Amino acid sequence: MRVAWKLAAGMTCGVGVVLAAQGVFHAYRLADLQESELSDDELILSGTLATAVEDIWATSGLSGAQDFLGRVREDWPRSRIQLRTREEVDPRAPLPEAAEITTFQRGELWFVSAAAPVRIHDETVAVLEVSRDLTQDVVYAGNALRQQLLLAMVGALFAGLGSLWLWLRLLGRPLRDLTALAQRVAEGDYSQRSALRRRDDVGKLAQAFDEMSEKLERARMRVKAERRARTQTLEELRHADRLTLVGRLASSIAHELGTPLNVVSGRAMMIATDEALPAEARENGEIIGQQAQHMAGLIRDLLNLSRKKQVAREAQPVRDVVDSAVGLVVPICDDRDVSVTIVGRTDLLAEIHRGKIMQVLTNLMMNATQAMPDGGTISVGIERVEVEDPRDRHASAGTYVCISVTDEGVGIEGDSLEQVFEPFFTTKREGEGTGLGLTVCHGIVREHGGFLDVASEVGRGTTFFVYLPMFEETP
């Protein structure tokens, strides 16, 4: 708004000065023209009357000339006509040789006077003076000057108001909108765009501002993605360090506890099967044996997790592997009133290690069975999918065989969903899981160049997705 007021003030002053100068020039020009016309009229009148007086004086004398001038005064009431003889003229003033014009002021009155000599026989005998009051003409010229100045002021005022309106209409509002948009961008909101759609310089400015906002938004997204990738890399390094430590610890534990646990398990089973012992003792022996086996299994999982082995892979029908894995878990599912259905394509191939992938699928289906203590259905699907942005940054975009395992259980909470693939994390009750199963599965699938993903809805169930790079036979 400050610029608008400055522009309006400058326009008002500039137009006012120009119009005022033009008005003053016009008024003075008009006054000069009026004075010149009146002077010419008086000069012509004096010369004409002087010639007439000379003729009448020559024939009728001074009295005849005075009578003639009396009649002329009646016809020219605004002009003062006076005939002064040589004796009446100031002897110190030179007599005019020809008609002369003068302008003079008496008090507040202005007059124009023309004097012409009256000659009789080439001798100047009198002076004919014709004068006229210019006061009304001077007043008119002054009024005209004031009117011109007033018009200049009014014109300047309208010019200033017009420039102010044009500024506000063409620039003020768009600049105000762009300023507000710039403030929002400065606050970090790069999603806002200008609503100006004009083909002038303001429109180009708005378009450039939108392009700048888009570039800032893309830059912020890149920085955010880089920060997220850096954070993920740090987390993976931290997990890798943890797994390295776990591997070393597991190797040590395996050597230190493996044999004692086998001894404990064997002795416990002997107690559990000794018919001579009381029932309570046999039951306690069975419990001790089960827990010892559980501890031994935990140690084996730790060892498997810490070892990185190159597995031999070959192209195999994915449906055959799924059928084999389902065949392994069906007896357990039947005992828990859980049914398994397989849907999807049967012609898809993947280059895999059959045993490892069966281990992944059986683990997922066992987890699904445990998630439905009251029974239900496990749905296994096989589809071909195109993946553009893999969940795992170690995987690349491309064509994958997606094996989905869906249960009808209670689902997984959102906070827990982000941690399901982390070591030692489990949603099962104490004693039902080690928290390493999904971590092992995740490592196996990653070794195959794929990745795991999960989707869950509390109260509706959970779906795990196994993505394996699809193998396409070359003709």
Image: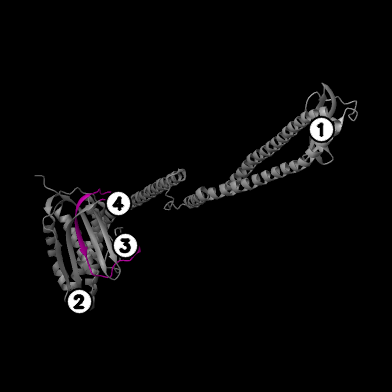
Labels 1 and 4: the sequence-earlier one: 1
What label does residue 277 carry, if any? 2
Which residue is nearer to you in this view: 7 or 409?
A: 7
The residues tagged by marks 3 and 4 sit, at their Cα atoms, a distance apart of: 29 Å
Q: Secondary structure at mark 4?
A: helix
Q: The residue under label 3 is which amino acid type?
A: Leu
The residues tagged by marks 1 and 3 sit, at their Cα atoms, a distance apart of: 122 Å
Q: The residue under label 2 is which amino acid type?
A: Leu
Which residue is nearer to you in this view: 367 or 296?
A: 367
Where's residue 125, x and y in %? 86, 26
Q: Residues within 10 Å of mark 3 (few under 14, many from 20)?
A: some
Labels 4 and 2: the sequence-earlier one: 4
What label does residue 417 carry, if any? 3
Classify residue 436 as left or right of residue 100: left
Q: The residue under label 4 is which amino acid type?
A: Arg
The residues tagged by marks 1 and 2 sit, at their Cα atoms, a distance apart of: 168 Å
Q: Residues within 10 Å of mark 4 (few under 14, many from 20)?
A: some
Where's residue 435, x and y in %? 28, 62
What label does residue 129 carry, if any? 1
Q: Which residues are magenta?
A: 388-415
